[in-house]
Image (spheres, rainbow, N blue to C red):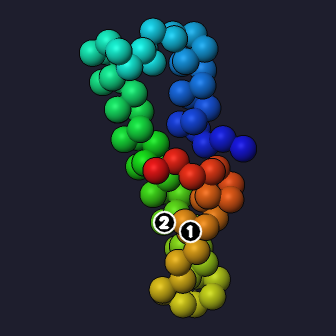
Amino acid sequence: MKTAIQEMMSEIQANYPKLFDVYSELGRSFVNDMHKYLAMEQQQIIDAFNAGQANEANEPFWTKGNYYYEQKYGKHN
């Protein structure tokens, strides 16, 4: 399973491979930006999972979002 950002990155890489050329300034900038957005999306998924678990368990400190994200989407940090 892929997140929306991961899916978008795969499509862009297939259609515009030069954007992923980390030996060019444009490529480095693009890849760095994509990793920044991937990290933001990861945190949003973790936060949403934790909020859902807290509501379900009625425990505000439930913190299994990291585990959920890694199981569903793999480790990306």
Q: Position of residue 11 (x, y in %)?
A: 60, 20
Q: Residue furthest right?
A: 1
Amino acid type, label 1: Gly
Q: CA distance from mark 1 to mark 2?
A: 7 Å
Residue at 27% over, 15% down: 25
Question: What secondary structure is marked by label 2?
Answer: helix
The residue shown at (64%, 64%) is 68
Q: Is residue 28 left or right of residue 56?
A: left
Most distant residue in the left direction: 25
| Label 1: element kind | helix
Placement of 34 over or under 24, stated as above or below? below
Residue, disc 2? 47
Query: Would you say 28 lies left or right of 2 here?
Result: left
Q: Is residue 48 visible?
A: no
| Circle 1 residue | 65
Count of numbered labels shown in the rendering: 2
Residue plotted at (56% across, 28% down): 8
For badge 2, the amino acid type reads Asp
**The image quarter in which residue 21 lies:** top left
Q: Quadrant of residue 71?
A: bottom right
> Do the CB atoms of the residues marked 1 and 2 lie less than 8 Å apart?
yes
The answer to which of 44 and 15 lies nearer the viewer is 15
- Quarter of the image for the N terminus: give it: top right
Q: Position of residue 13 (x, y in %)?
A: 55, 18
> Residue 56, percent across and down?
64, 83
Which sits in the foreground, 75 or 9? Answer: 75
Q: In the picture shown, does residue 45 fall above or below 16?
A: below
Does residue 23 lie above or below 2 as drawn?
above
